[in-house]
Amino acid sequence: MFETQRTYAAADDHQAGVFCPNCGHSVTAGAKFCQHCGYDLTSVTTSRQTQPKRRVSRWKWITLGIVVVALGGAYGYGRSYFAPSKQLDRAITAIKGNQKTVAQQFTSSDSSLKLSATTLKPLLTHFKTKQADLARFQEQLKNQSVTNDGNFQYVKTGRTWLLFDKYQIQVKPLYVSLTTNHKNVQLSMDGKQVGIADSDDYDQKVGPLVPGDYTLSSSGVVGGHRLKNSATYYLKENAKSYDLGLRTISFNVIGAPGTVVYLNHQSEGTIGDDGTLAVKDAAWSSNLELTGKYPVGKTMVASNPTRISDGDADSDVTVDFPSLMSKSDADDYITQLFTAISNYTRSGEIDDATDDNNKALSDYFVDGTANRDYQEFIDMAKGYYKNDDVMSVDYEPSVSLSVPATKGRSQVTYDVKYHFSNTKDDREQVFRYTATIQKNGEDYQIVKISPAQKIRAHTTNTDEDDD
């Protein structure tokens, strides 16, 4: 006989509290203990009611915490990214890189000025060639929110992400006048015609403009000759007038032979061996600028620019190279140098090696007594002094040329005529040198001297040339 085994199905969620989870018998609803096995029914109810609630609450707080942290991080990042100084830095980067989006960094105080990459190009061109101006521009906007000329302000123009202030560089537009002195002359700005003169005293107003570099030009026929007045100007003053009158100017350029002369970057020729270049009937402009370039090896040394005015007509204009020793100064310098050498030659005492102003011979040289050329002059003079066959030596220097060198130095070419009175004869020798000289404060010093080049030699008692 087999005993029948009773099987109980697990109670589902809907029957919780009706069947005992321990023995499977039905129990009275609300009972605390099973009347069949004595199982504590309250522990089951509590577990089933509270466990899911605890799980939901924990994830809610975790999620909320993540959101709070993310929002806080985003706000902190945005606060740093949109700080006024950071926005200005990005604007300057856009200017330096000539980015297509650079116009987004600017706004205008005049609605008639439409800002774009095209209208901003003159400003970007100026900053590209004048990095120091860009640095001052950035510094002034950062420190005082306005440039010293008042053309630009760093202003708040709105909000970003509804939370952060938006800043832009505000442009104050310029209006300028172009004038000319002949009827039917065409006036242009950056190659685009802006007006045609209808009188011999014509004034054309142009604007609004972004401050920057513009090429202003006028062209026409005057007295049967076609003339053009063209130059690049940095426009930065409102209501300023620019004279584009058509006329010519002639003058002489004085400078080192071999210097190439330019007027507004256009070559006018090369200074000849006589140190002059005649400029004839050059087209004049109120912004006419003369510069020179002198070849030194593979390098072209540039002069300082010299502005040409109406008053320079039919006069001499000197090419001004930085720290270049003038020929007259070089002549005085070399003469005094050999005065000190002559005094030492006569006495043999180093204390006597001074010029007429008591300047020591060593002071004429970079590194003083350690300079090799100084030591060679000392050895030469001492040798003449000790040579019993040499009764006297006279030095007669003459400077032929002073030209620019690299590093702001000068190359001075000079001849020295040596007169020897010997026990047996009188001799005359001429040697040529080129000294590299640099400015040292208010004075000059010799860096080095090229090896002597013998020009001629003559002995008076035989009248024979030693060449």
Image (cartoon, grey):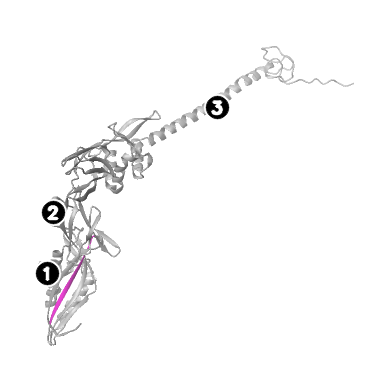
Which contiguous range is marked in magenta? 408-420
Q: Amino acid at mark 3?
A: Trp
Query: Residue 303, image x and y in percent?
Result: 22, 57
Compared across the picture, whether 138 is left or right of 36 comes to: left
Instruction: Write down the quadrant of residue 175 in the picture.
Output: top left
Compared across the picture, whether 34 is left or right of 49 comes to: right
Q: Amino acid at mark 2?
A: Ala
Query: Residue 261, image x and y in percent?
Result: 22, 58
Mark 2 or 1: the one toward you? 2
Q: Nearer the viewer, residue 333 or 261?
A: 261
Residue 443 among those drawn in magenta: no
Q: Nearer the viewer, residue 163 or 253?
A: 253
Q: Amino acid at mark 1?
A: Asp
The image's mark for residue 313 is 2
Question: Of callouts 1 and 3, which one flags the residue occurring earlier in the amino acid sequence?
Answer: 3
Q: How many marks?
A: 3
Give the SS element for disc 2. Answer: loop
Question: Of callouts 2 and 3, which one flags the residue occurring earlier in the amino acid sequence?
Answer: 3
Compared across the picture, whether 291 is left or right of 105 comes to: left
Tell me the quadrant of the picture where the C terminus can be found: bottom left
Mark 2 Cα within 10 Å, few/some/many (few <14, many 20+)? some
Residue wearing tag 3: 59
Residue 445: tell me if it is visible. Answer: yes
The image's mark for residue 355 is 1
Mark 3 Cα within 10 Å, few/some/many (few <14, many 20+)? few
Mark 1 or 3: the one toward you? 1
Residue 414 among those drawn in magenta: yes
Residue 208 sits above or below residue 323 on the image: above
Give the SS element for disc 1. Answer: loop
Q: Please, which residue is most extreme toward the left here? A: 356
Chief SS of the magenta region: strand
